[in-house]
Image: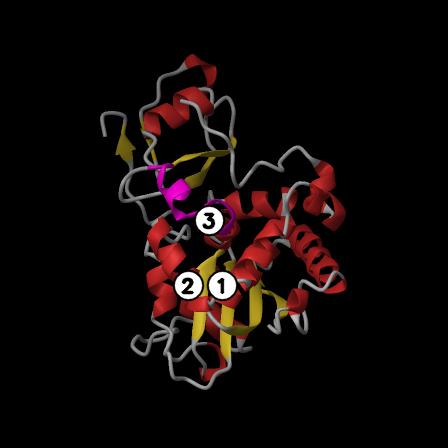
Amino acid sequence: MSFEPVLTKNVGVPEARELKGYIERGGYASLKKAFAQKPDELIDLVKASGLRGRGGAGFSAGMKWSFLPKEHPGPFYMAVNFDESEPGTFKDRYLCDHDPHQIVEGTIVSSYATRVSVAYIFVRGEFHLQAKILQKAIEEAYEAGYLGKNLCGSGYDLECVLHRGAGAYICGEETGMLEALEGKRGWPRLKPPFPAIVGAFGKPTVINNVETLCCVPHIINNGAEWFTTIGTEKSTGPKLYGVSGHVNNPGVFELPLGIPCNELIDKYAGGVSNDKKCKAAIPGGVSMGVLATDQ
């Protein structure tokens, strides 16, 4: 299978972690293209791409954005879910380790598309190093004029705040995350009302996973049709797969959506260690069932 990495193209390029190196490799190019369009046009673009949430639910990102009330006076907030507390998941951490500015860029263009004035990036409490890496990227973006007032002369203002969690598994659930963001005990809210109507601090709030937002600049740069050429008809685009356990080559692999689990384990993760055969795999978090090799 021929596939060119999209989200992980800067992995193995240490200079891409710094603003200068990231820009040299095409970083922040999507901002100019995004600001030349109206927010609703960008929402339609993301809808057309078929981008689905990468946090687990797989809901249409563009559809989710369109639920924000049109006539609400604001402010609107963005809550970026970087809690990643599910055991066995480490793909968002991988993105932050190697390409933190991609997270910031995805947050900016997605915030513009949804008329957000403040973006909160909620980082898992145990991610001490990642919080430092991402905070540095945010500060560099402020210095370059990509955050703050009148971004790139567009007239659009955006503040970005990194908020560290306190180590609660439940804060990976979106409304539990909102409660923690407000300084309360992380505990899921009853729905409705949904966060798009009553979210952080009682205001309409967009909630997306880190990997979801990282896809958005690439869609803006390359178009919705390009994105649909990757993956399957109903699940488009690239996906990061974290493989751990008794395999020879554990790690994060970027591949199109739709790859069989057996191929992921045997071809990319190097097969089961000690030359043994795979008997079963857990294809998601701890709440998932176990898949046998014939499934």
Q: CA distance from mark 1 to mark 2?
A: 6 Å
Residue at horizontal 40 percent and vertical 22 percent from the top: 1
Q: Position of residue 21 (x, y in %)?
A: 73, 43
- Compared to residue 95, the image places residue 43 above or below, namely below
Q: Along the polypeptide, which appears first: circle 1 or circle 3?
A: 1
Residue at label 3? Answer: 219
Farthest residue toward the front?
36
Image-quadrant location for residue 98: top right
- Compared to residue 266, the image places residue 126 above or below, namely below
Residue at label 2? Answer: 41
Q: CA distance from mark 1 to mark 3?
A: 14 Å
The stretch of residues the image draws in magenta is 219-231
Q: Residues within 10 Å of mark 2 (few under 14, many from 20)?
A: few
Q: Is residue 129 magenta?
A: no
- Label for residue 37? 1
Residue at horizontal 35 percent and vertical 22 percent from the top: 278
Give the residue type at disc 3.
Ile
Q: Position of residue 97 (x, y in %)?
A: 64, 44
